[in-house]
Amino acid sequence: MLTANGEAVAAAAGTVTQLDEAALIRAAQKGDQSAFERLVQTYDQPVLRLALNLLRSPEDASDVYQEAFLRVYRNLHAFRFDCSFHTWLYRIVSNLCVDHLRRRRVRREDPAVIVTSEGPMDRLGSVPEERAGIDPERWLLSRQLGDRIRDMLEALTPRERMVFELRHYQGMRLRAIGEVLGTSEEAAKNCLFRATQKMRAGLGDFV
């Protein structure tokens, strides 16, 4: 586990310890290409999952993934260990995702998809296919709920959506979310409250 706040994102992706990671960063800052590649291997899947969960577009997620690590490569020399590498990296990814969300809010997005260790899957409840053995009424309600959740996520502002994702799907604490977004824990808490209220209001007849 690479962060003191209980986040397990990086730990799930890589095997380096906190001390090993610091050594890799310092080596990469001195131009060690293999050290930088090891850092990428440690975080590549969490970064891709976060981007795909937020953007719900494999093409956009791939663009963010590539741009994020390109920015890390270009700016790693400026990393001063005043925050965790995980926080610094997620800040880059989050800013890129927010930019994408702001640019495309005017159009409807593709169905929600997430990437797991077993491959892509629908995050919004894994809506079952209509086949023999499935209660038609239950299937319809599940389908309607999935559609409503997608609509409500699209109605959130990019920042609200980011906070909602980091808290409920990434399991991050509000303090860590504030650090990622470059704001305070209280601001992150208020943003999450607004997002949750909007989601509850939109799902009123389902909850």
Image (cartoon, rainbow, N blue to C red):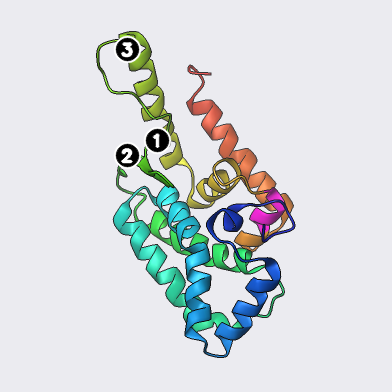
Amino acid residing under circle 1: Arg
Question: Mark 3 or mark 1, which has the lower sequence index?
Answer: 3
Amino acid residing under circle 2: Pro
Element class at badge 1: helix
Q: Is residue 185 left or right of residue 115?
A: right
For residue 80, what is the image quadrant? bottom right
Q: Position of residue 132 (x, y in %)?
A: 25, 11
Q: Dots 3 and 1: beta carbons under 8 Å?
A: no
Bin the neighbour count of mark 1 within 10 Å (Cα to Cα): few under 14, some 14-19, many 20 and up.
Answer: some
Question: Mark 2 or mark 3, which has the lower sequence index?
Answer: 2
Q: Main secondary structure of the magenta part?
A: helix
Q: Is residue 92 left or right of residue 125?
A: right
Q: Residue at x 55, y 27 (%)?
A: 200
Amino acid residing under circle 3: Ile
In front of the other: 14 or 202: 14
Q: Position of residue 114 (x, y in %)?
A: 41, 44
Q: Residue at x 64, y 54 (%)?
A: 177
Q: Dots 2 and 3: beta carbons under 8 Å?
A: no
Q: Is residue 112 left or right of residue 186?
A: left
Residue 111 bears which disc, if any? Answer: 2
Disc 3 designates what residue? 134
Disc 1 designates what residue? 150
Q: Dots 2 and 1: beta carbons under 8 Å?
A: yes
Q: Residue at x 37, y 36 (%)?
A: 122
| Magenta-colored span | 173-178
Residue lying at the far front in this picture: please name it. Answer: 15
